[in-house]
Image (cartoon, rainbow, N blue to C red):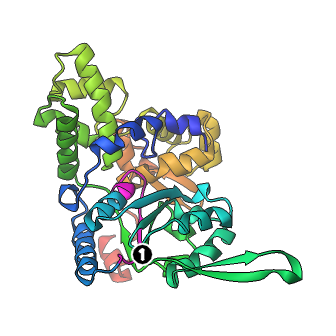
Amino acid sequence: MSDKTTSNRHISPSKKREDGRLDGLLRPQLLGEFTGQERLKANLSILIEAAKGREEPLDHVLFHGPPGLGKTTLAHVVANEMNVNIRITAGPAIERAGDLAAILTNMRAGDILFIDEVHRLGRAVEEILYPAMEDFVLDIVVGKGPGAKNVRLKLPRFTVIGATTRLALLTAPLRARFGALYRMDFYEQEAIETIVLRGAGILKVPIEPEGAAEIALRSRGTPRVALRLLRRVRDFAEVRADGEITGETAVAALNLLEIDSLGLDDLDRRVLRAIIEKFGGGPVGLDTIGASISEESDTIMDVVEPYLLQLGFLERTARGRMATPHAYAHLDLPLPHHAVSDKPNQRSLFSSPAEESDEE
């Protein structure tokens, strides 16, 4: 995947360096301040209250779902609710079993170890983590060859909170050791508007409800994208307007960024136009699409395609990708005859021969 392509997109849900500088400021601290994900919050609240009532550490928790939805934020919220310390690391950062052992031996009773992108842990590291999560012990091999000895160290009871965007890549033994699994879904429009208004208040940016609604509409249901767009619209308002984010100001700023009313940017539209205008709406393979717009096929599959599938603009078939009638309508392009799904002579899977003869 092209890191440059991903980092240049304002609507990319992946974390950027500029996001990290304001994360601590904009991040909710308690569960009551966290907007959206109502069912998840209800279940998590019960888990936390039960653990606090028993005066026990929280069970191991796994958050999974698309990037930018607040998995790291929820880990901090849980630590605050439990009033414990949180240690933060990431799967790719733990390269050797000794790295994980050093972290675990410094944990205190009740502490939380947050592992982002937990599916990227190495096999040797996972083998150390299994007994640590299950029995709170650390097995260390001292020495080499025939004289090597296995030393077992007892660990305080702690909690592992894992986060992953690729649940299917998590090994079954590791997934089984998490007592609570929660999926995070894309946010509703109203929830994103609330997040934008809250963020504007923290940043001390004057904003009208119409401005917040416009930003939320184009943020793909992702809080990270919404807050990033809020900062870009704030810049536009300060330079081109009187500093207040109105509906008109938000529309002008986001149009200048080439982000349309559904959150599609230039790359999304180039992919759709390539399929429609160069290949007759498809089916066409990812490699061919990538070559036609000078982008890598991995970038299209991992960065562009998921949101287009979610909108119903793209269809996966055995022969390749096809643009749907919704994509034609959004781009204001004429729909060819072969793309019409409700052909009058198309046989229904549920129609009987008698019904077909009646229609004839």
Of 143 and 122, the residue lying toward us: 143
**Residue interval drawn in magenta:** 57-73
Of 215 and 97, the residue lying toward us: 97
In the picture provided, is 245 more to the left or to the right than 271? left
**Image quarter of residue 25:** top left
**Image quarter of residue 352:** bottom left
Check the image and report above or below for 248 versus 63: above
In the picture provided, is 302 more to the left or to the right than 360? right
Q: Quadrant of the N terminus?
A: top right
As helix, strand or loop, the secondary structure at mark 1 comes to loop
Three-letter amino acid code at disc 1?
Answer: His
Residue 109 location (% of width, % of height): 41, 73
Q: Is residue 89 magenta?
A: no
Residue sitting at 52 percent across and 77 percent down? 155
Residue 349 location (% of width, % of height): 40, 75
Of 154 and 86, the residue lying toward us: 154
Check the image and report above or below for 112 versus 251: below
Q: Residues within 10 Å of mark 1 (few under 14, many from 20)?
A: some
Residue 272 showing in the rendered view: yes
In the picture provided, is 25 more to the left or to the right than 110? left
Residue sitting at 11 percent across and 37 percent down? 209
Residue sitting at 14 percent across and 28 percent down? 206
Residue 262 showing in the rendered view: no
Q: Is residue 69 magenta?
A: yes
Residue 86 location (% of width, % of height): 40, 60
The residue singled out by tag 1 in the image is 60
